[in-house]
Amino acid sequence: MAPVETKGNKMITASSARGRFLASLLQTMRPGHNEHKRVPGAFPTSTKEWQVVFGNDYIEAYNYFLEVVDPTYHHSAGWSNSGKSYSRAVKPRETIKQTLDQWLEEDPNLLRRYVKRAGFVVKEVTDLAKVAVINGIEGFFQTEYHKDLLKMHVASLDEDGIAFVRMSASSENPDGRIYAKGPSLMYLPSYIREAIVSRQSVVDMKNCHPTALVAIASFIDPTKNFETLKSYVSDRELHLKTICGYYNVARSASKEIFQSISYGMRLLKKKGSSGDMAKWIEKWEANPPMIGGEYVHSEFLKNFSKESRQAGKLLVQHPAFAKYANIEDLQKRISYCLQDVETRLAEVAEAVLNEAGHQTTCRIHDGMMVAGRVTAKDIETVRRACAFFCEQTYGTDLGMDFSKKYIGGN
């Protein structure tokens, strides 16, 4: 295949590893997901990954495919304080898609993986007949970007719609969330993912992080009531809709602000002030009510913020999270603790479902897709197993609940 010439006149040759790496960037850099908190639309990525994939040409490749939008953000990744690797806030250039289109035109098999790799591997199965159907439905895709994501995903499959996807956690937090290494159903928007599989069940934890936060904090200090947090856990949809109307935002924006506040984000007082919530307002074009130049926030959200900070400070005291004690940033420490709970319970649920004959077909953070129809009895077995694990690990049953959804073959 013809190599790609960068601005610095370096020639970047194609390879399966490089193709899958670029395709995974397109998937993980979805607008509205995994965004770098300072710059809407930007994402953190480590130069260490680029060194592994592109070798001596990694700097040329990095600059050719990415635009650095926050040069002040130098969070060391992998080699702490060594100066060898840094994670910067970047935005993908059009050259990623252009290069992948060129490489795939020359070699349609570039992204395919036929051999099961070592480590934690998930066998993902996509219904190619359904892919053909939705590609022919006018207006199905919410954006052209989503259509491109599906194209790259299909290019990574074999002729039967199968891909063996390796999963692992980040080197920075090896006990945290696990991610697919390369193209995966995990990275597709849910409306596409659920439209292109057959005879699989989606199993999700309900309100995983808020449920874990309030349960463990209450265990550490039983005198605390956390009435607002408990209300959110028990009636989440009502509160999401209320915040959508109050700030005039979409449901995904409402979910995001509750999650960010549960990690310790503070509400913004004055218009023009900086901070994480200022970015949220800008990103989602929110319209908080104002009086005298100051925001008037929802009473429920103010109470949620207050209780979340109290609960977070208690959460990190639990002995199960002693491994995160050296993390100075409280928001980051809280998020790592909650992701730890999420990952452990997902592992328990996966083991129970696999034992019942429902093999994993995709992992999605606090949920998964598995083969076959999951029954109410299966879910109850998962609940009991997770309750036992939590009592042994955290000293209390977190009361984690699970939902199920079956996707048939039609």
Image (cartoon, rainbow, N blue to C red):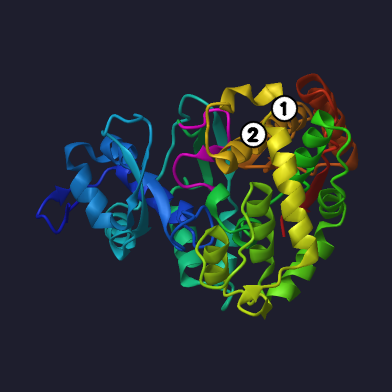
**Residue drawn where x is 52% and y is 64% of the image:** 279
* Magenta range: 172-184
Q: Identify the residue shown where x is 87% and y is 50%.
A: 227
Q: Secondary structure at mark 1?
A: helix
**Lateral position of residue 251 relative to residue 176, left or right:** right
**Residue furthest out toward the front:** 292
Residue 181 in magenta? yes
Query: Within the image, what quadrant is residue 76 found in?
Result: top left
- Residue located 89% across and 35% down the image: 223
Q: CA distance from mark 2 to mark 1?
A: 22 Å
The x, y position of residue 151, in whole percent, is 45, 60
Reading the image, the residue beneath label 1 is: 351
Query: Type of residue at label 2?
Result: Cys
SS state under label 2: helix
Residue 302: x and y in percent read 74, 60
Q: Position of residue 281 (x, y in %)?
A: 57, 69
